[in-house]
C-alpha cells in the first residue's frame, strides 16, 4: 500500500462518552508527512469544551462507579481495552504510519502491541498491589491504602502518540482516576479512537475524555490551568514542561514530566562492533531520529574511531528511506513542515560550527514522484571534536547524529555528563567492571549496556536534570497516580 490516503477524516472531541464538535466549530488540518495531503480536519477544543471535559471527568470521579468499583472489575475493563486494540491492530498501525510518517512495520510490530500491553500490564499490576502494615506495639495498628487522586490531564507528543498515551492511561485508570487526554495537534488520529475503544470496553462515560488542539493559549493551556484537574502527566519538550509547571502552579497540580534528551552512546575500544553498529544505527535513526531516547551523541574511543566512522557511515547509507507504508522502508519523513525546518536549520548550524559531514545532509534523491512533497531528510552523520558545539548539545530530534572522539574513560564520562539532559545513556564494552563503573557515573535515568530501547515495564523510567520530574513504570507510575493514605487503629 502506498502513502496515498485520500480520505479526509473528521476528528471530533470525545467528552462524557460522546463524540462532539467544537463549540466554536473551529477545525484545523492534519497532513500526511510523506505527501503533505490533508488527512484529517480536527475539532479544536475551546475553553468551554475543555471545561466540559474536565467537569465530566470530575463527575465521573466523584460520583462513580469507576473509583469505587471492585478493582478486579475495573481492571477487566482496562484489559478489554487492550484486547480491542489488538483486534484493531492493523487499522491503528496504518493510521499511526499515515499520521506520524513512521514505518507501518514498526507501528504494527512494536508500538500497537506495546500500547495494548501498557494497559494490560497496569491492570494486572494494580490487581496485585498490596499496602503496608505498621504495628505499633500492642496498642495501635497502622495500615496503608493507595487511593486515586482525581482528574488527570494526560498530554502527549507526536512522536509515539498512541504508545505514550496508553503508557499514561494504563496506570491512571487502573488506580481509579479519570482522564482528559490531549494528544499532539500534529498526530491526533489514533488517540482520538481511545474514546470509542473505552466505551466498547464498558468504561463508564466521563472516565476517558479526549480533547484536541494546540498548546499555548489553546486546549493544552486551558487544560493545565483548569481547577478541576488535580494532576498532569506530560511528555514533550523541556521548555513546554516549564510552561506547564507555571500554569499548573496556581492550582498546585501534581506533575510528572518526561522531557527531552541528548543521550551519549559510548563505544569503548573493546566493544563488539558487530552488535554496537546496528544497534547504534537504530538508536540514531529509528522513527527518523524523533525519539527522546535517541543515541544522538556517539562517543567513540580514538583507537577505533576511524573504523567505527567508516562502518557506521556504510550502515547509515544502507537504510531505506521511503514510503512509511512500504514494508521495506526503514525511515520515513519528519513529522511536519515546521519540524523539518527546525531539524534542517541544524545543517546550517553544523556548517557554521565546522562539523565534518560524513554522510547525508540533504533530501534523498531517489524518492518516487508521489513522495516529492514529503519532509524527507537522509540519515545524516557528523564528526565533531568539540562536545560543546550546538549540534552536540541541543536536541535536534531528527535523523542527525554527531560522532565525538574520546581518549580515556574519564573523558567519556565528562563528555556524557556535559549536557542539561539526563534521560538515558548507552555503553558498549566487553569489560564487566567498566560497564558497571561507567553506568554508575553517567547521570541519566536509564543506562543500557550493550543494548538500547529494552524496557521492562516494572522498571523506573524518567530523566535526571532537565529531562524530567518523577518516574513512570510499575510502582513508580502508581506513586504518581495514587494518594497514599495511612489508617491508624487503636486496638484497645
Ligand atoms: P511539545 O512539548 O511541543 O508538545 C507536547 C504536547 O504538549 C503537545 O500535545 C502540545 O500540544 C502540548 N503543549 C505545548 N505547549 C503547551 C502548553 N503551553 N500547555 C499545555 N500543553 C502544551 O513536544 P513535541 O514536539 O510534541 O514532542 C517532542 C518532544 O517530546 C521532544 O523534546 C522529546 O524529547 C520529548 N519526548 C520525551 C519523551 C520522554 O519519555 N522523556 C518521550 C517522547 C518525546
Image (cartoon, rainbow, N blue to C red):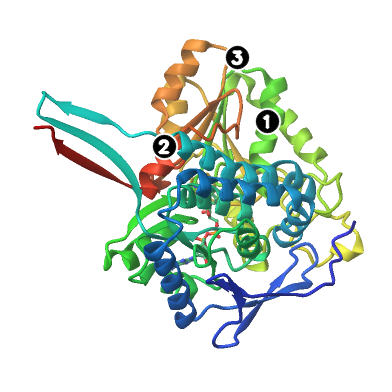
Kindly report the distance in space between the C-alpha atoms of the residues bearing marks 2 and 1: 29 Å
| Residue at the (48%, 15%) spot, across then down | 434
In this rendering, the answer to whether 317 lies above or below 97 is: above
Q: Which-is-in-front pick, marks 2 and 1?
A: 2
> Is the C-beta separation of discs 3 and 2 under 8 Å?
no
Figure check: 49 above or below 101: below
Q: Position of residue 473 (x, y in %)?
A: 47, 39
Residue ID for mark 2: 475
Secondary element under disc 1, as helix, strand or loop, is helix
Q: Position of residue 105 (x, y in %)?
A: 79, 45
Label 3 secondary element: loop
Q: Mark 3, mark 2: which one is toward the viewer?
A: 2
Which quadrant is the C terminus positioned in? top left
Q: Is residue 441 left or right of residue 311?
A: left
Disc number placed over residue 361 in the picture, else none: none
Q: Earlier in the sequence, mark 3 or mark 2?
A: 3
The x, y position of residue 301, in whole percent, is 56, 23
Point out the residue furthest to the front here.
492
Q: Which residue is mark 1?
A: 279
* Badge 3 or badge 1: first in the primary sequence: 3
Q: Residues within 10 Å of mark 3 (few under 14, many from 20)?
A: few
Does ligand 1 reach within 8 Å of label 3's beta carbon?
Answer: no
* Residue at (35, 54) in percent of width and height: 149
Give the answer, above or below, for where 489 lies relative to 409: below
Find disc 3 in the rendering and name its residue: 270
Q: CA distance from mark 3 to mark 2?
A: 37 Å
Amino acid at each position: 500500500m502506498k502513502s496515498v490516503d485520500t480520505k479526509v477524516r473528521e476528528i471530533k472531541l470525545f467528552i462524557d462518552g460522546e463524540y462532539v464538535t467544537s463549540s466554536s466549530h473551529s477545525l484545523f488540518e492534519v497532513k500526511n508527512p510523506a505527501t503533505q495531503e490533508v488527512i484529517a480536519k480536527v475539532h479544536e477544543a475551546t475553553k468551554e469544551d475543555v471545561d466540559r471535559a474536565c467537569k465530566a471527568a470530575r463527575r465521573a470521579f466523584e460520583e462513580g462507579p469507576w473509583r469505587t468499583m471492585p478493582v478486579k472489575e475495573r481492571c477487566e475493563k482496562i484489559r478489554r481495552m487492550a484486547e480491542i486494540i489488538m483486534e484493531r491492530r492493523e487499522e491503528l498501525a496504518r493510521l499511526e504510519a499515515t499520521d506520524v510518517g513512521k514505518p507501518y512495520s514498526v507501528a504494527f510490530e512494536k508500538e500497537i502491541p506495546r500500547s495494548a500491553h501498557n494497559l494490560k500490564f497496569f491492570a494486572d499490576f494494580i490487581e496485585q498491589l498490596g499496602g503496608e502494615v505498621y504495628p505499633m506495639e500492642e496498642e495501635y495498628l497502622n495500615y496503608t491504602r493507595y487511593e486515586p487522586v482525581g482528574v488527570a490531564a494526560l498530554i502527549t507528543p507526536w512522536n509515539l502518540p498512541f504508545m505514550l498515551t496508553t503508557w499514561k492511561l494504563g496506570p491512571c485508570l487502573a488506580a481509579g482516576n479519570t482522564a482528559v487526554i490531549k494528544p499532539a495537534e500534529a498526530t491526533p488520529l489514533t488517540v482520538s479512537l481511545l474514546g470509542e475503544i473505552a466505551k466498547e470496553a464498558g468504561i463508564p462515560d466521563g472516565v476517558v475524555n479526549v480533547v484536541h488542539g494546540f498548546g499555548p493559549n489553546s486546549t493544552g493551556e486551558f487544560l493545565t490551568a483548569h481547577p478541576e484537574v488535580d494532576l498532569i502527566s506530560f511528555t514533550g519538550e523541556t521548555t513546554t514542561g516549564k510552561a506547564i509547571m507555571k500554569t499548573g502552579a496556581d492550582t498546585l497540580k501534581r506533575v510528572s514530566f518526561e522531557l527531552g534528551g541528548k543521550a551519549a552512546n559510548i563505544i569503548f575500544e573493546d566493544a563488539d562492533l558487530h552488535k554496537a553498529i546496528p544497534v547504534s544505527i537504530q538508536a540514531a535513526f529509528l522513527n527518523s531520529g524523533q525519539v527522546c531516547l535517541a543515541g544522538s551523541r556517539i562517543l567513540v574511543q580514538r583507537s577505533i574511531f576511524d573504523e567505527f566512522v567508516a562502518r557506521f557511515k556504510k550502515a547509515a547509507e544502507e537504510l531505506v528511506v521511503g514510503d512509511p507504508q512500504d514494508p521495506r522502508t526503514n525511515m520515513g519523513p519528519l513529522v511536519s513542515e515546521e519540524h523539518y525546518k527546525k531539524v534542517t536549520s541544524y545543517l546550517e548550524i553544523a556548517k557554521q560550527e565546522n562539523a565534518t559531514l560524513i554522510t547525508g545532509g540533504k533530501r534523498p534523491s531517489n524518492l518516487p514522484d508521489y513522495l516529492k512533497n514529503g519532509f524527507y531528510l537522509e540519515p545524516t552523520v557528523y564528526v565533531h571534536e568539540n562536545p560543546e558545539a550546538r549540534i552536540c548539545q541541543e536536541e535536534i530530534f531528527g535523523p542527525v547524529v554527531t560522532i565525538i572522539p574520546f581518549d580515556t574513560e574519564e573523558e567519556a564520562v565528562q563528555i556524557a555528563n556535559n549536557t542539561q539532559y539526563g534521560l538515558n545513556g548507552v555503553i558498549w564494552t566487553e569489560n564487566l567492571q567498566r560497564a558497571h563503573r561507567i553506568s554508575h557515573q553517567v547521570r541519566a535515568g536509564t543506562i543500557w549496556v550493550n543494548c538500547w530501547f529494552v524496557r521492562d515495564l516494572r522498571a523506573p523510567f524518567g530523566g535526571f536534570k532537565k529531562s524530567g520530574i518523577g518516574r513512570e513504570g510499575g510502582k513508580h507510575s502508581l506513586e504518581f497516580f495514587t494518594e497514599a493514605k495511612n489508617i491508624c487503629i487503636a486496638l484497645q
